[in-house]
Image (cartoon, helix red, strand yellow):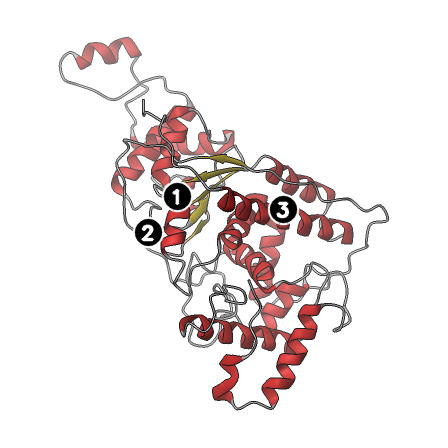
C-alpha cells in the first residue's frame, strides 16, 4: 500500500490555532448546556465528538480520505456502509451472483465481474473510489467534514489556507477549525431550527438554566499529518443547485445556493460568525445591533481589501451578505438565554461607540471605523453530499 513514512509536519503554532477552535466550541457548548438550551443528549454527543476529534491536514481532499479508508484509519458508519453498499450492488448487479471460485475461473478467460462476497465496508470503499474517478473531488476546498464516517474527523487544507490568507474570503485557521468542527457536532435539531427561521417561522426560546453548572472539558485534538500518497488527485467542483425547494428567504438580489443555504452549512457559518465577532453564548441582539454587525462586516472587508488592516476579525463569511438582518437576529437569539444589558460586554459597548461615531461621520469615512484585532440518486453515495467548507 501507500508509503506513509514521509509526512508533512504541522507547526506548533498551527496546532495551537486549531486547538483553540476546538476549545472555543467546548466552552460555547458547555455554556449553552448550562443555560438549558442544549439537552443532555445533545451536549454529550457534541462534547464527545470534540474529545475524539481527529484532524487530518491535507491538500488532497477526498483522495486523502480514500487512502485513510483503504488503510483502515477511518471507517464508514454502519448505516452509511449499508446504504452505499446497496448503491454498489445496483451498479454491479452480477458481482455477488457467482462465488469467488467461479469468478476466478471466469477471470482465466478474461471475464470479470469484479470482487465477490465483499463486506458492506469494502463495497462502500469501492463505490467511493469509482465515484472519485468520474466526479469532482474536494481538492479545492479549505476544509471538509464527512457525516458518513464513523470516527469524529475533519480535514483541513492548511497549505491552501496560508496561500490564500491575503484574500478577503479566506478565514483564519482557528475560524476554519470552528466551522468544520461545528459540522462534526451533528446537532441536527439545532440546524433544522435555523432553516425554519429562514423560512419565516418564529420561535420563542425560554430555556431553564441548570442549577448545577458543568465545566467545559479541555480538548486536545489528535493531529494526523498528511502522507505522501500515490493516489491520483481528482480535481474539479460539483455543480450546485439554485432550486430553492425549502423557500429560504434571502436578501434581495442574492441567488439561492444549495450548498451555502443548507441547514448544516448555515449553522456552521453562524458559529464561525460568533467566533470571529466575539459574540457570547448568552447574548441576544436587537435589530439595531445586527445592523451594527453588518456595518462592521462591511468596514472590516473594505479595510482588509484596502490593506488598512491585516485582521480577519469581523469579516463576514456568507451570513451578513446573504440573509436579512431580522432573520440573522432571530437565528442568533434562538440559542441565547435571555436579554442581556447592552453594557454587559465590551463587544456591545464597542458597537455603541461605533454607532454613535457613524452617526456623526460621513458615509465615505465609515470604512475607517475601528477594527477589532485579531440521496436521491441511487448512484450517488451519501458521502459526496456531506458538508464541505467551499472557500476555493
Q: Disc 2 marks which residue?
A: 238
Q: Disc 1 marks which residue?
A: 384
Mark before the other along the chain sequence, 3 or 2: 3
In 3D space, how far apart are the residues under numbered discs 3 and 2 (Cα atoms)?
32 Å
Under circle 1, the secondary element is: helix
Q: Disc 2 vs disc 1: Cβ atoms closer than 8 Å?
A: yes
Q: What residue is drawn where x is 47% and y is 58%?
A: 171
Mark before the other along the chain sequence, 2 or 1: 2
Q: Which mark is residue 340?
A: none
Q: What residue is drawn where x is 60% and y is 40%?
A: 50
Q: Where's residue 173, x and y in %? A: 49, 52
Q: Disc 3 vs disc 2: Cβ atoms closer than 8 Å?
A: no
**Where is residue 391, by image quadrant?**
bottom left
Q: What residue is drawn where x is 32% and y is 44%?
A: 137
Q: Nearer the viewer, residue 256 or 46?
A: 46
In front: mark 3 or mark 2?
Answer: 3
Residue furthest right in the image: 211
Mark before the other along the chain sequence, 3 or 1: 3
Q: Which quadrant holds the N terminus?
A: top left
**In the rendered view, would you say 118 is above or below 188?**
above
Q: Which mark is residue 23?
A: 3
In 3D space, how far apart are the residues under numbered discs 3 and 1 (Cα atoms)?
28 Å
In front: mark 3 or mark 1?
Answer: 3
Q: Where's residue 85, x and y in %? A: 40, 29
In 3D space, how far apart are the residues under numbered discs 2 and 1 (Cα atoms)?
9 Å
Q: Is residue 42 left or right of residue 256?
A: right
Can the viewer see residue 87? Answer: no
Question: Mark 3 packing: few (<14 Cα in 10 Å), some, or many (20+)?
Answer: many
Q: Disc 3 vs disc 1: Cβ atoms closer than 8 Å?
A: no
Amino acid at each position: 500500500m501507500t508509503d506513509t513514512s514521509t509526512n508533512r509536519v504541522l507547526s506548533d503554532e498551527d496546532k495551537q490555532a486549531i486547538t483553540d477552535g476546538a476549545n472555543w466550541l467546548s466552552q460555547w457548548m458547555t455554556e449553552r448546556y448550562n443555560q438549558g438550551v442544549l439537552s443532555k443528549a445533545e451536549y454529550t454527543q457534541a462534547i464527545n465528538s470534540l474529545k475524539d476529534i481527529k484532524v487530518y491536514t491535507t491538500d488532497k481532499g477526498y483522495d486523502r480520505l480514500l487512502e485513510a479508508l483503504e488503510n483502515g484509519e477511518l471507517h464508514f458508519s454502519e448505516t452509511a456502509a449499508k446504504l452505499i453498499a446497496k448503491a454498489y450492488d445496483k451498479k454491479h448487479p452480477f458481482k455477488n451472483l457467482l462465488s469467488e471460485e467461479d469468478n476466478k475461473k471466469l477471470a482465466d478467460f478474461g471475464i470479470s465481474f469484479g470482487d465477490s462476497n465483499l463486506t458492506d465496508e469494502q463495497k462502500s470503499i469501492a463505490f467511493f473510489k469509482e465515484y472519485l474517478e468520474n466526479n469532482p473531488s474536494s481538492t479545492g476546498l479549505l476544509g471538509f467534514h464527512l457525516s458518513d464516517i464513523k470516527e469524529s474527523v475533519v480535514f483541513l487544507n492548511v497549505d491552501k489556507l496560508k496561500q490564500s490568507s491575503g484574500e478577503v474570503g479566506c478565514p483564519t485557521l482557528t475560524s476554519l477549525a470552528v466551522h468544520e468542527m461545528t459540522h462534526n457536532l451533528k446537532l441536527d435539531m439545532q440546524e433544522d431550527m435555523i432553516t425554519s427561521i429562514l423560512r419565516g417561522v418564529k420561535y420563542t426560546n425560554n430555556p431553564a438554566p441548570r442549577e448545577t453548572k458543568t465545566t467545559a472539558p479541555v480538548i486536545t485534538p489528535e493531529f494526523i499529518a498528511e502522507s505522501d500518497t500515490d493516489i491520483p488527485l481528482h480535481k474539479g467542483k460539483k455543480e450546485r443547485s439554485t432550486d430553492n425547494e425549502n423557500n429560504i428567504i434571502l436578501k434581495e438580489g442574492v441567488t439561492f445556493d444549495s450548498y451555502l443555504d443548507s441547514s448544516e452549512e448555515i449553522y456552521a457559518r453562524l458559529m464561525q460568525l460568533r467566533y470571529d465577532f466575539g459574540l457570547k453564548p448568552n447574548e441576544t441582539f436587537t435589530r439595531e445591533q445586527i445592523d451594527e454587525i453588518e456595518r462592521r462586516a462591511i468596514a472590516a472587508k473594505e479595510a482588509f481589501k484596502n490593506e488598512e488592516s491585516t485582521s480577519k476579525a469581523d469579516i463576514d463569511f456568507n451570513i451578513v451578505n446573504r440573509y436579512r438582518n431580522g432573520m440573522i437576529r432571530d437565528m442568533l437569539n434562538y440559542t441565547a438565554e435571555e436579554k442581556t444589558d447592552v453594557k454587559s460586554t465590551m463587544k456591545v459597548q464597542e458597537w455603541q461607540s461605533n454607532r454613535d461615531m457613524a452617526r456623526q461621520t460621513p458615509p465615505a469615512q465609515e470604512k475607517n471605523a475601528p477594527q477589532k484585532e485579531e440521496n436521491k440518486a441511487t448512484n450517488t453515495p451519501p458521502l459526496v453530499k456531506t458538508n464541505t467548507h467551499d472557500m476555493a
